[in-house]
Image (cartoon, grey):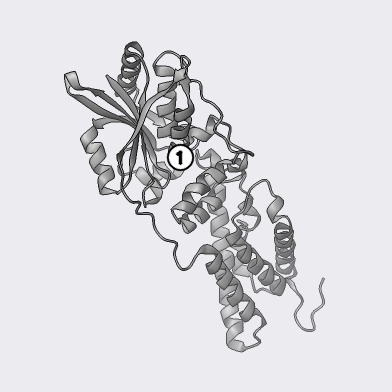
């Protein structure tokens, strides 16, 4: 029997940006060449509802190696194989553990991107399913990277600028603590490096390592309009219209104010829902709510009322926006810098709305 860990290169789609891990079991005598894959799920009618709420179950499935490899050939994704140096008893024990995990009553689990995914499951079954515990040396950089830094390595490599913006918007401050040595193995490449250095019973865990599929990456190139450019243009347009004293520009600004603050309110409501209404623990403690205020959803309808309470509200938004810009790089959560021009535009429009009109005294 031969048991190996397969590490698959990232793909061009967002769901495959971070690569994949699977376990291969071969027994030529019985014609066995199976892949144990912890990264599968069913695409049923309520898939999107389960996914948004964080209640989408993942499962361990078994497929043939040829079928598995064909999929990665079609996606032009390389595959590296590490053979585990277990003895016969350890291999049989691990194989039995895999088969037990694959039973209908055991195969499903609650997926967690950082702490319980296809890669951590493969590590844990190798670590505990064969009997003796594996010794993993430190693989961390100095100083250790945060979880957000770890995933940014993949997002930057895949030129996923807009995906990175969306992830930074939705995932809160819990992403910004340093990952421990064990926690860093939630990513396939990190686990592969850890296996290369790991030992079992005083000998190397990996007997041999080879590339079984070597294909060029189909990673996307960066789009011409990146988030920082897009929001920078928004700020320039808003600033130009704010100081252009024309009747038509005032009408355009009035419409823009409603659109901007209404959309900001919608984003804020979404962030609150992801924090309190789902099982996505990583969406908690989200400091993006300091600029995406849910209250803006209602205030957008009063944005150009001359009431004193409206002006006081937008004066408060101005102060909050200025404080946020001043503390941007010191917050417990690392904010995406592409949002800075947007926050500047919020501050500018809040100032223009809150300041007294010509001949009007501030209360």
Quadrant the N terminus occupies: top left
Residue 326 coordinates in the image, percent (x, y): 74, 59
Task: Report the front residue among 246 and 19.
Answer: 19
Residue 306 coordinates in the image, percent (x, y): 70, 74
Residue 266 coordinates in the image, percent (x, y): 54, 58
Residue at image point 24% right, 33% down: 65
Residue 211 visible in the snapshot: yes
273 vs 346: above or below: above
248 vs 133: above or below: below
Residue at image point 61% right, 82% down: 250
Name which quarter of the figure residue 264 lies in: bottom right
Q: Does 86 sit left or right of 298 as displayed?
A: left
Give the labeled residue for mark 1. Answer: 54
Name which quarter of the figure residue 303 lies in: bottom right
Pointer 1 local density, CA inside 10 Å: few below 14, some 14–19, many at least 20: some
Q: Secondary structure at mark 1?
A: loop
Task: Report the front residue among 260 and 65.
Answer: 65
Residue at image point 19% right, 22% down: 28
Task: Report the front residue among 160 and 343.
Answer: 160
124 vs 188: above or below: above
Task: Report the front residue among 69 and 229.
Answer: 69
Residue at image point 48% right, 28% down: 197
Residue 278 coordinates in the image, percent (x, y): 50, 41
């Amino acid at each position: 029997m031969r048991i190996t860990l397969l590490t698959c290169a990232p793909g061009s789609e967002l769901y495959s940006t971070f690569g994949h891990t699977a376990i291969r079991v071969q027994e030529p005598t019985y014609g066995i060449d199976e892949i144990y894959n912890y990264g599968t799920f069913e695409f049923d009618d309520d898939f999107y509802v389960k996914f948004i709420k964080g209640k989408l179950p993942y499962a361990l499935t078994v497929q043939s190696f040829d079928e598995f490899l064909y999929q990665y050939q079609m996606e032009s994704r390389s595959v590296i194989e590490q053979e585990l140096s277990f003895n016969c008893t350890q291999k049989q024990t691990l194989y039995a553990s895999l088969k037990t995990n694959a039973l209908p009553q055991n195969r499903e689990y609650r997926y967690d991107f950082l702490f319980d995914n296809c890669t951590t499951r493969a590590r844990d079954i190798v670590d505990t399913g064969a009997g003796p515990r594996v010794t993993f040396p430190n693989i961390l950089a100095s100083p250790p990277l945060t979880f957000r830094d770890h995933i940014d390595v993949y997002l930057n490599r895949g030129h996923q600028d807009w995906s990175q913006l969306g992830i930074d918007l939705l995932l809160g401050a819990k992403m910004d603590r340093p990952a421990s040595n064990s926690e860093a193995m939630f990513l396939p490449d990190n686990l592969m490096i850890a296996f290369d250095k790991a030992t079992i019973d005083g000998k190397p865990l990996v007997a041999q390592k080879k590339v079984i599929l070597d294909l060029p990456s189909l990673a996307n190139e960066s789009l011409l309009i990146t988030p920082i450019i897009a929001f920078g243009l928004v700020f320039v347009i808003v600033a130009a219209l704010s100081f252009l004293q024309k009747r038509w520009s005032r009408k355009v600004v009035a419409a823009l104010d409603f659109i901007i603050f209404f959309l900001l309110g919608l984003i804020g409501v979404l962030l609150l829902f992801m924090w309190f209404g789902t099982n996505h623990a990583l969406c908690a403690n989200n400091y993006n709510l300091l600029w995406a205020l849910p209250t803006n959803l209602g205030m957008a309808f009063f944005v150009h009322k001359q009431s004193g309470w409206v002006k006081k509200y937008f004066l408060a938004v101005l102060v909050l926006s200025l404080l946020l810009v001043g503390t941007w790089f010191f917050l417990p959560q690392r904010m995406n810098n592409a949002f800075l021009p947007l926050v500047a535009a919020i501050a500018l429009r809040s100032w223009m709305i809150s300041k007294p009109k010509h001949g009007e005294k501030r209360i």
